Image: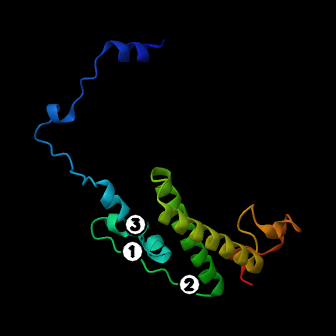
Amino acid sequence: MNDYNKMNHVMPNFFDFQEIYPQAQMPKTPQMNQVEKKKEEVGSPKEGYTLGNLFVNTYVPYKNYMPQKLVAQNEQEALFLKMSELAFAAHELNLFLDVHPDDQAKLKLFNQYRQEANQAREKYENQYGPISIQANVLENSPFLWEQLPFPWEGGKR
């Protein structure tokens, strides 16, 4: 047993923040009951991606921060943005389902967004080249990304 573990076994756990600093106010976090948890409203993938939070009734903006509206300049950017929004929404629901595995409505929505994100990624990669190692377009040409120009080289098709 190292010294750190010995110390933890000998010393009692006596640290109580409120006891040491009674004037400090700990932030109050609202506790939701089980019924309220089920009412968590899910925003659209676009809204969730823009805010960084798919669950609109739990979004708390930072001070006076205003999210920027993302606008695609061309078809490639529009497809990439759509793919990113759907992947974000699927990921957020995946995290939610880690804690609430029995929520069938969220599971259904997760699977829908996951499938749409995969379809959008496949469409993007077929039109504009691979963006991940899982790209199906790499089956026939594993080094396709070496043949395509990078964006800073004028890599738009």
**Among all residues in the image, which is located at the extreme right?**
140
Would you say 117 lies left or right of 140 here?
left
Q: Quadrant of residue 74?
A: bottom right
The label on residue 67 is 1
Q: Nearer the viewer, mark 3 or mark 2?
A: 3
Would you say 48 lies left or right of 146 here?
left
From this viewpoint, is residue 153 visible? no
Q: Quadrant of residue 142?
A: bottom right
Q: What is the x, y in percent for residue 80?
A: 62, 76
Which residue does the numbered mark 3 point to in the structure image?
Answer: 55
Q: CA distance from mark 1 to mark 2?
A: 16 Å
Which residue does the numbered mark 2 point to in the structure image?
Answer: 72
From this viewpoint, is residue 49 visible? yes
Mark earlier in primary sequence (1, 3):
3
- Which of the two residues, 134 or 71, is positioned nearer the viewer here? 134
Q: Amino acid at mark 1?
A: Pro
The residue depicted at 21 percent of the width and 50 percent of the height is 27
